[in-house]
Image: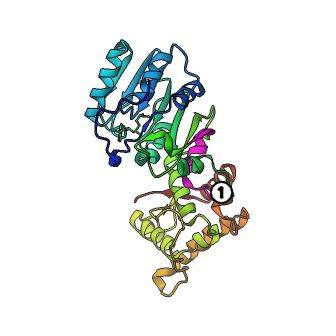
């Protein structure tokens, strides 16, 4: 049975408990848990979902930050006589090392959605699927396709390694206390095959391309700041045009509410090197017909192709932010 609220709930820790048993049942059913599975649950709270998971799986590992929650959860699990199937890790899920598990099922604190999804999909542990209850806007971004207004860096990076399926919307009224936002359930499944690329470089490249996601790539790579950053890296590395060219992608993400940055045009001798490098960058974009394209409309295949073209010209991406 759901509910059992014996502790004061803190909004700052995302403590909104899901109390509708029909929705809890559907989350468990959609997760397709096998009786031999070990399920990882992040943020079990007082255990509304946990009690359902323990019934379906061989064992459940929960990671919960709040000791008060752990005490209530353990009491409920003991009352149900299933404590042997539960392992509790009383830590921050972003810092804890996860033991082996088959799948994740969780109603997570929304404040850690982004780093937690990254930790799961890019983490060392192999798993079958991750069923997550997320803030609706975040779920929509995960599900977005190129050209959708919600499509951004998060969708690009997650879609490189995983497929995301929409399961259902959940109204904020189903939680205690009622949060300000609605929710949605999605299932994330790792792709069977992922591109054989340097992921650190991919993230830096995507960060550079999406620094203003609706700006053309030509405009992005003409920015004075980018070119000058590159020049700095050039001098630092002492490469002077030989070997790898590193482009920093320390810019802020996304485009809302910021004025455009100045385009690079050389005004002194020290800026001549950067000017020719800018031409090299634009040459790559032009040769692939990418100059007028906006990153928010490009598929992962197109972005992978562009990265390969930069690499062929000896240009590599590197995040030193
Ligand atoms: C949205 S509540 C979900 C509770 C429960 N799963 C449910 O559906 O009723 C999120 C839970 O995550 C816990 N939490 C918050 N930040 C956390 C973190 N960084 N690591 C682990 N647990 C966290 C909160 O204490 C809270 O119990």
Q: Is residue 147 magenta?
A: no
- Percent x, y for residue 100? 43, 24
Q: Is residue 169 magenta?
A: yes
Asked whether, in this view, residue 250 is left or right of residue 88, the answer is right
Residue 249 shows up from this direction: yes
Of residue 314 and residue 253, the one placed in the foreground of this image is: 253
Q: Which residues are magenta?
A: 149-170
Quadrant of image for the N terminus:
top left
Question: Which quadrant holds the C terminus?
Answer: bottom left
Q: Position of residue 297 (x, y in %)?
A: 68, 59
Badge 1 crowding class, 10 Å Cα cut-off, few under 14, some 14 to 19, many 20 or more, is: some
Ligand 1 falls in quadrant: top left
Residue 112, compared with residue 240, is above or below; it is above
Work out whether residue 270 or residue 67 is closer to the camera in this orientation and state it: 67
Q: Toward which corner of the image does residue 81 lie, by quadrant?
A: top left
- Mark 1 and ligand 1: say if the CB distance to the nearest ligand atom is below 8 Å: no
Pick the front one: 10 or 247: 10
Residue at x-position 55% and y-position 52% = 137
Question: Does any portion of residue 57 appear in the rendered image?
Answer: no
Where disc 1 sits, the SS reads: helix
Q: Tell me which corner region of the image, top left, top right, bottom left or bottom right, holds residue 166.
A: top right
Which residue shows up at 34% across the image and 45% down it?
13
Task: Residue 300 in the image: state x and y as whole percent.
Answer: 65, 50
Q: Residue at x 59, y 49 (%)?
A: 140
Badge count: 1
In the rendered image, residue 309, in percent from the top left (x then y), is placed at: 65, 57
* Residue 220 in which image quadrant: bottom right
The residue beneath circle 1 is 306
């Amino acid at each position: 049975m759901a509910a059992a609220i014996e502790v004061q709930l803190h909004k700052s820790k995302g403590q909104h408990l899901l109390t509708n048993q029909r929705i809890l049942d559907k989350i468990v059913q959609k997760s397709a848990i096998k009786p031999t599975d070990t399920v990882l649950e992040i943020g079990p709270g007082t255990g509304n979902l946990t009690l359902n998971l323990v019934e379906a799986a061989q064992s459940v590992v929960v990671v919960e930050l709040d000791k008060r929650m752990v005490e209530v959860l353990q009491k409920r699990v003991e009352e149900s006589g299933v404590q042997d199937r539960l392992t509790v890790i009383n830590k921050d899920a972003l810092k804890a090392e996860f033991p082996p598990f088959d799948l994740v099922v969780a109603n997570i604190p929304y404040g850690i959605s982004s780093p937690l999804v990254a930790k799961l999909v890019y983490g060392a542990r192999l798993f079958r699927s991750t069923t997550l209850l997320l803030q609706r806007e975040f779920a929509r971004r995960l599900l977005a396709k190129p050209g959708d207004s919600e499509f951004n860096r998060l969708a690009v990076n997650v879609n490189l390694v995983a497929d995301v399926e929409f399961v259902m919307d959940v109204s904020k009224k189903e939680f205690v206390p009622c949060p300000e936002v609605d929710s949605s359930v999605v299932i994330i499944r790792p792709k069977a095959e992922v591109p054989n690329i340097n992921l650190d470089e991919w993230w830096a490249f995507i960060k550079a391309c999406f620094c203003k996601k609706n700006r053309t790539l030509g405009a992005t790579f003409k920015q004075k700041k980018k070119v000058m950053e590159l020049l700095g890296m050039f001098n630092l590395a002492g490469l002077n045009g030989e070997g790898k060219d590193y482009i920093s992608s320390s810019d802020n993400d996304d485009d809302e509410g910021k004025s455009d940055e100045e385009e690079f045009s050389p005004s002194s001798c020290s800026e001549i090197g950067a000017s020719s490098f800018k031409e090299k960058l634009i040459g790559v974009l032009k040769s692939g017909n990418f100059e007028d394209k906006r990153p928010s409309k490009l598929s992962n295949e197109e972005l992978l192709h562009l990265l390969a073209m930069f690499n062929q010209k000896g240009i590599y991406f590197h995040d030193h932010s």
